[in-house]
Image: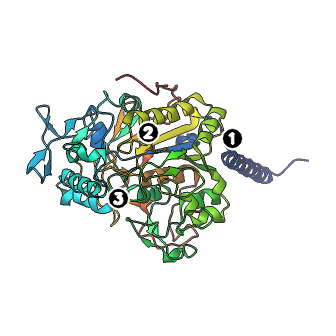
Amino acid sequence: MRLHPLRTLVVAIVALLVLGSAVLILRDANRANGTPVGTGDLTGIHKIQHVIVVMQENRSFDSYFGTYPGADGIPMKNGHPKVCSLDPSTHRCVYPYHDRSQRDYGGPHGASNAKADIARGRMDGFVAQAGKGSRKFCKKDPFSPLCSRPNLATTVMGYHTASEIPNYWNYAHNFVLQDHMFEPNYGWSLPAHLFMVSAWSAGCPDPYNAMTCHNDLKHPDHDFRATPQVPDFGWTDITYLLHKYHVSWRYYVANGTKPDCDDDQMFCTRRTNGLQNHTTPEIWNPLPDFVTVHQDHQIKDIQDARNFFTAAKQGTLPAVSFIVPNGTHSEHPPALISKGQAWVTRVVDSVMRGPDWNSSAIFVAWDDWGGFYDHVVPPTVDHNGYGIRVPGLVISPYARTGYVDHQVLSFDAYLKFIEDDFLNKARLNPKTDGRPDPRPGVRENASILGNLKNDFNFSRQPRAPLLLPTHPGS
């Protein structure tokens, strides 16, 4: 029997729709269980099936890349820095200098310290704040060996080059360096990690009523509980949308000492930072304390970092990974820079050696500036920030080669990239995401925020891995 031409067309359209739906269902199922999705039929940003955010600790952009060629680095005149930070104790201006040490000390890095460092745009408060922070610490712990160090406050003006961090400069040379990546908020590690997963930092008197949450950059964990069974954070985080769209995720935590104390002070008093692992909520592992993670039964997706290396080797990485170090590998002063670089290199090498490399994008950043000098005045987005500049790297088979990205960025750009890639551009927007909260705005939609897609060339063939030694020479 011959079909009418119109009926034939209708049948063909229906068949295509069914086939397309089947492909989408299969793709989402693969994302959910970690099965790699071939990139041959995908275009643009969707060639990235594995986003990996590596979050280190406490470095400003100028402290790591202030002399990197082509970057917005330390202003120079005749080869010498022409910017400085006043030392009130000597009434002298301290200029940036090449710090060849692998161990630094930094400065205090709370929200008030960030604003004092910025000094209404003069960017000259760093030494003064470090001096206040060291005096406060030494008053509490006068017998600490740190208190016998001369010129402790002026170490915030030190910067490193490829001599001390060759792998980081190698990644910048071969992939993408972002020279206007700003901490999304003023302040220390906890609010920075909260912004990383939710684009907000707040305290919640009743975490099961998100509308009771209120802006807090100082101590959003004021009623922090030492058990993951009782969450404290009630507003909406990225895992809520990932679960809603059936997209897999993991948050990997390295066992060991915490990178810092449970506050925003300059140093821990006699190593009071204690231990961390993936089972307890704390500063570098905030997701167990989110109501959404409990309600969606996804506590199991917060895992030991050793599982990341296994997944990378087996080609079963989730669609979205966050991975955080322990104190030894964090680069948080006074941890050795070389150990942090070795940790990041191990993470990157594991992805490059595994089956998921050709569909991965690795974003490396440092959670806050750690009190170290930076000369760029942060742009103002809202009353929470942006904070002071931090280094940012993009490592991917599709990343541009030797590209310095001058776009204004913050950790909000990671969320935006994830949302554009996996969530059909859904946003953490209380008016549209189905879960209202009183956040001050939709950070991913900020007009000043750049787009990480500009760091990629998706028309090229995926590049071969660039494996680096974990302990390189200078």
Q: Which mark is residue 35?
A: 1
Residue type highlighted by circle 2:
Val
Residue type highlighted by circle 1:
Thr
Mark 1: give few (<14), some (14-19) or many (20+) Cα within 10 Å: some
The quarter holding residue 76 reads top left
Marks 3 and 1, Cα distance to the nearest angstrom?
A: 38 Å
* Residue 23: % across, % down: 71, 46
* Residue 263: % across, % down: 39, 59
Up the image or down, 216 lies above or below 359; here it is below
Mark 3: give few (<14), some (14-19) or many (20+) Cα within 10 Å: many
Residue type highlighted by circle 3:
Gly
Which image quarter is the C terminus in? Answer: top left
> For this rendering, which residue is in front, 158 or 223?
223
* Residue 459: % across, % down: 50, 34
First in sequence: mark 2 or mark 1?
Answer: 1
Residue bearing mark 2: 394
Marks 2 and 1, Cα distance to the nearest angstrom?
A: 23 Å
Judged by depth in the image, the label closer to the viewer, 3 or 2, is 3
**Secondary element at image label 1:** loop
Judged by depth in the image, the label closer to the viewer, 3 or 1, is 3
